Amino acid sequence: MEKPALILTRFAPSPTGLLHIGHAYAAVFAEKIASHFGGHCLLRLENIDEGRCRQKFETAIYDDLAWLGFHWATPVRRQSEHMDDYQAALNQLSQMDLLYPCFCTRKDIKDATAAPHFGSHGPDGPLYPGTCRTLTPCQRQQKIESGRPYALRLNMKRAIQQAGPLFWKDLAQGTIQATPDIFGDVVLARKDTPTSYHLAVTVDDDLQAIRIVTRGSDLFQATHIHRLLQKLLGLRTPEYLHHKLMCDQNGQRLAKRNKATSLQSLRKSGHTPTDILIKFNQLVQVQLEEIV
């Protein structure tokens, strides 16, 4: 495969906890893929969740990555500092009549999708039943003026009609046809978080000219949504490469919520970067051999 110049990948952690071995592998993977294609890797902080993100975890991310020997360009893009970019994208989608306010609470949605006859499920669970999609403009305005909190959802059916057939290239699996409808009417913004993961990363990858998106296989399905947003917003489409997830001895995926061993604790207990990198470099090489 021809190696294009100036390839950019990105490692984009969220500062909601300490980095663990799984994060370390994702960072090494992104950097090695960039190097393989003669380019470099950017660091980005996906800190849109103000309720969970902490400055101390940002500091820990920098410390852990420096310990691993990870190098990044500065300034680092912090999503919380670029809400105007995401709002501009929301405005564009709104002008295309692709967004609608959803006033349903989590309980409303749970009750609606718990009915025995409700059989529509997607990668994230039961699909939103579309309760607020059919509200009239007058009904929507009345609810907004009453102070009801709401989220902005993408009218998936209308969005797909405007976008037409979509595809993306996965470096390990070849050409993939996008089927974003498997997610239903996804939320793109909330009152407490004025953008979503899907919208923010799609906008950021274009603004930062990311050529190859590397991330865990658990995010493979999210690419369906991102490809749709790229088309609707007129953004570039990168190539993708999803790596295997690191698991514990019981086969359970390493995650913050499962209290996976942090890099900070490994550093403090006397481990060296070499202890981690030798194994990781071997794993990355195996996946490089799978690139089509």
Image: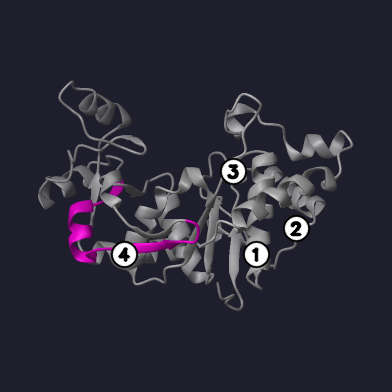
Element at label 3 = loop
Q: Which mark is residue 70?
A: 2
What is the CA distance from the residue labelled 4 to the residue labelled 3?
26 Å
Give how far across and how far down residue 47 sits, in percent: 56, 50
Element at label 4 = helix
Q: Give the range drawn in magenta.
A: 151-172
Kind of residue sitting beneath label 1: Cys
Give how far across and how far down residue 132 sits, in percent: 18, 42
Front in this rendered view, residue 82 or 147? 82
Q: How crowded is mark 2: few (under 14 residues within 10 Å), some or many (20 or more)?
A: some
Mark 3 against mark 1, which lies toward the viewer? 1
Residue 155 in sight from this viewpoint? no
Q: Name the residue under label 3.
A: 53
Kind of residue sitting beneath label 4: Asn
Kind of residue sitting beneath label 3: Cys
Q: Mark 1 points at which residue?
A: 41
Front in this rendered view, residue 81 or 119? 119
Front in this rendered view, residue 252 or 140? 252
Element at label 1 = strand
